[in-house]
Every structure is written in C-alpha cells, then in structure tokens.
Amino acid sequence: MRDFSQDHHWLSINTATIRKSNGTDLPLPVIIEACARRGIRAISPWRDQVTAAGLAQVSRLVKQHGLSLSGYCRGGMFPAADAAGLKAARDDNRRAIDEARELNAACLVLVVGGLPGALAGKAAHKDIALSRSQVTDGIAQALEYARSVGMPLAIEPLHPMYAADRACINTMEQALDVCDELDPGRTGALGVAVDVYHVWWDPKLQSQIARAGKERLLAFHVCDWLTPTADLLNDRGMMGDGVIEIAKIRRWVEDQGFAGFSEVEIFSTGNWWQRDHDEVLDTCIARHKTAV
Amino acid sequence: MRDFSQDHHWLSINTATIRKSNGTDLPLPVIIEACARRGIRAISPWRDQVTAAGLAQVSRLVKQHGLSLSGYCRGGMFPAADAAGLKAARDDNRRAIDEARELNAACLVLVVGGLPGALAGKAAHKDIALSRSQVTDGIAQALEYARSVGMPLAIEPLHPMYAADRACINTMEQALDVCDELDPGRTGALGVAVDVYHVWWDPKLQSQIARAGKERLLAFHVCDWLTPTADLLNDRGMMGDGVIEIAKIRRWVEDQGFAGFSEVEIFSTGNWWQRDHDEVLDTCIARHKTAV
C-alpha cells in the first residue's frame, strides 16, 4: 500500500468538490488554477462545468498545467421511456466519450441512470428490471464506440438510496456481472469506479474488489459517510469526519494492483460548498495524508 | 397470490404508522381502538409505545379486540463498545422476547444495530466487520432463549443507508447467511422480515426470497419509496405513492408459501404524521386493496 502521509502526489480533485465557493458557483478555470497552484496533479471535471467554460479552453488549461484527469464525470443515464429517449442517451454518451478523449481522461465514469423521469420527481414506470436491461444495452453500445477511440468506461455502482433516480447499478457485484457479460476478456475497456461512499456498507466489498482485479479497477473515489446524514445527495463528509474505513478499502484496491489517483468527490450543500474553496482544497490535501 | 382487492383481511398496521396524529403523539390504546374499529385484524406495536401504555394493559386490549400481532418491534441493537454494553443488549433482547411472547406476537423483529454510538452521532469505532460479528453472536444468544420460549426471531435487513447507525445487516443475502449459520435446520425459529422499503432496490431480491423459502419468511412490511426522498429515516411513502413494485414483491414472497399479514410501516414526519390518524388508517385500507 502506497504511503500517502508525506505528500499529495496521488491526490485528485473531483471538481464537484469545489463546485461552489462561499456558496457561489466557481468556474472550472478558477478550480483548475487553484488545484495547479497547490501542486495537485489530477482533477476529474464534470461535463456541465466543462461546457460552461468551453471544451477547448479546458483542454488548453489542462495541458498548460500538465494535469491528468483521473476520470471524466460523467456518461450514463441510459434508461428512457421511449425510443427517442434511448437514442438521445446513446448520442449523448458518444459526445461524452469524445470529450473525455479530448481531455485525455483515464476513464469516462458512468452513472447509469434509474427509472426514467424519477430524477425529475415523476417516474415513467416502476420496472427497475427494465431499466437495468436498458442500462446493459446502453453500456454495450457505448462500449463499442469507446473501444474504437480507446476510452475506458468505468461503471460507478451508486449507493442503493439512488436506485430509483440516479443509478440502478448499486453494488460492485452487479457492476462486475455487467463487466463479465460485456467484456469477458477483461481487456481493460470496461471496469468500475469504486467510490467508498457508495460501497463501504457492502458485506461483499472486499471479495468483489478482489474479483474486479487490476483490469477492472479504473478509479477510486473518496469522501466520508456522516452520522447523521442530513441529505441523501449533498451531505457527504470530508475524509476522516465520518465512519468509512477509507484506508482499509484503499488497501484492498491497491492489493489488486490499482496504482492510480485517490479522487476526492464531496457534495456538501450545507458545509464544504459554503466555505472558501482555498480552505476546502487545503483540507483535502491534509486529509489525503491522514485519512486516506 | 391472494386477492387483496376486496377487503383488508390481511392488513396489519405497524403502530409507528400512526405514532403521531396531527403531529401529536398518539397513545397505543387509542391506536388499538382505531384499528379494531375498522376491522383491522393485526397490528405490530413498538416497545416504547407498549412501555408507555403498560404491557398488561396492551395485552388485555389486544386480547379484548381479538387482534393478532404480525410482529413485535423490536429487538436487536446488539453491537456495543464494551462488555457491559454487550451484556445490556443481551438482557434487553431477553426482555423483548418475553414481551413478544406475552403479546403472542408472530415474531420478534430484529433491527440488529450498527456501529456503537453512531445513532447518537458519535461512533465508538468504524469497524463494521466487528459490529457484524457482534450481531451474529448476539442473535445466537437471543436465539437460544427465543427457542426455549417458542418466539421466532425475524432479522430485518435494513436499507444500506442505515448501515452505520441502525443495522449492519443490509441485504437479504447477508441476513440469510446468518440464518444458515445459526439455524441450518431451517426450524422456523430464525428468519427474515422482508420490508419492501429496505430491499426493493436489490438486484438479487427475487432469488434471495426464493432462497429464504416459507420457513424463513416471517414477516412482510410495506410502504413506498418516494422520489425525491427528503429524509433518510422519516420520509417513507404510502403504498402507491412511490416507485416500489409492491405487488410483484408480494407475489415472490407468496410464491414461497408466505400467507401472513402485509404490515404497513410508514415513518413520515412531514406528511402522514401531520394528518389525522383516522385519515391515515382509511388510506392504508384503501391502498392495501389497490397498491399492495
């Protein structure tokens, strides 16, 4: 297991973590500068932030600062209520793959979607098995294109509390079943993003990380689970402030040969997004050394 | 699959559902009268409500109205930070078993506990594997006594969002592994309470219900998953208002031979607990016919 205690060589910042500074939206170029100034070597930006700043400018800034992308957030959202919706999702994932390639991301992270319409508050149907079938089909189609341009796809199993509205792939086991079905040769074109927030509770986590192996472990995300948790989406904790055994899980991942970045991804309406982003980044660096 | 559309013969009311009426605590005797008045044949009361009303009075009222108890809520909370805490939990579970027996409950429902202290906001440690080990030990001890008095124990796998503070048994598969370990003979002394709210998302739900079989399916709880869900604990929906395929899951359970009550258990600070309990009960009866 790598020693993180001395530096932040393997720290990546998911740009959602400082999406807001003092409660106000922070543009991606400012986020990139703030990371680069601290010698942070990698980021994982969100598509909406990239779109707002312009892909060309972001690409230029990333190169200028010599930043790596530990991932690109995000593709997915495959299920739809009709054929037009399915096609729109397919087209959008193709664009996401192109953007990830332009930015030279290590992988495109897939948040696969749940029941169509549920995120807007009104599910078109309740058939989660149908959504799961559409997800597998959608990943298969995306994978064909992603392979052709050399962009790995990382399925991110989301916590079961997001099964209805954000992702109906909810365990490592389920994600790896899809990987086995669509990439039986373990080529590295398809794998998983392990976010400790989503999977820490899983009694099968260690065995499924071992099952994944180096070829399928494409990203490692960290934050913490707070007790109590005030909001299902936006009350994630800074590493060390919650109950997740982050270092133990990192060891399991690294025991399989994972040697990439630890990407900090914190959504926090009430706490971290209310603070100044400089304080948040400094805290991420400190906690990366002590709690990851 | 039984036809529920014509009557509420198989409806049970978990008394937490009308714990409050118009935002105010409702005493258990009033709850019992309100259920009996509507020809509801079963309830599942909570220990704190029984304690407040007095066990003897509750026992008398239950008999007087000819009510069944589809379960008794609840035993469990096994993990502790020290030996004294473990012993206190053991003693408390013994008392819960005695109370369940006095009330002639179909089973004692076990909410097994998580990280000690987490429910109060400060976990004594983060070692969920240790908690899980203490849970298995605690159930083993409780089972010995429960067998001797003929009270079945129903492990309730809780949604993974409660893994830290309420229950570190979070899937049917995990609960059934414990059942297999402690009751390999499938005697009926140990089984599971299937609450659709906790397990609906699980891609292995159907296969694990089949694995459980009639001997291990001791209780069936219903409510619904709302989108969005505003609170991790107390924003559960009335059947039909959310995204759970309740009837499909009931069919899976009944296909195994389950022939007990469908127990409505809704925690709802912002909605149902603000309404009059008469309205809530009438709605439960109506939805039992149309959405369960």
Image: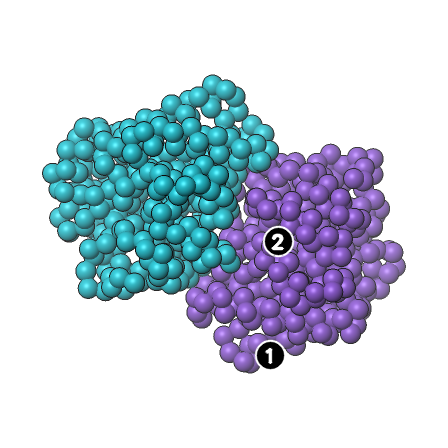
Chain colours: A cyan, B purple
Labels 1 and 2: the sequence-earlier one: 1
Q: Secondary structure at mark 1?
A: helix
Residue at 33%, 58% in the rendered image: A254
Q: Which mark is residue B172?
A: 2
Q: Is residue A108 above or below residue A237?
A: above
Residue at 62%, 63% in the rendered image: B178
User: Chain ID for label 2?
Assistant: B
Circles 1 and 2 on the same subunit:
yes
Outermost left residue: A64
User: Chain ID for label 1?
Assistant: B
Q: Secondary structure at mark 2?
A: helix
Between residue B151 and residue A71, name the one nearer to us: A71
Number of residues whose C-alpha sits closer than 10 Å to that of mark 1, classed few (under 14), some (14–19) or many (20 or more): some
Of badges 1 and 2, nearer the viewer stands 2
Q: Which residue is mark 1?
A: B87
Q: How many marks?
A: 2
Residue at 38%, 46% in the rendered image: A216
Between residue B283 and residue B24, name the one nearer to us: B283
Specify the amino acid type for callout 2.
Met
User: In the rendered image, which quarter contains the C terminus of chain A?
Assistant: bottom left
Q: CA distance from mark 1 to mark 2?
A: 27 Å
Residue A85 spot, x, y in % from top left: 47, 22
Outermost bottom residue: B84
Between residue B124 and residue A106, name the one nearer to us: A106
Residue B150 spot, x, y in % from top left: 79, 69
Q: Is residue B87 above or below residue A40?
A: below
A205 left or right of B51? left
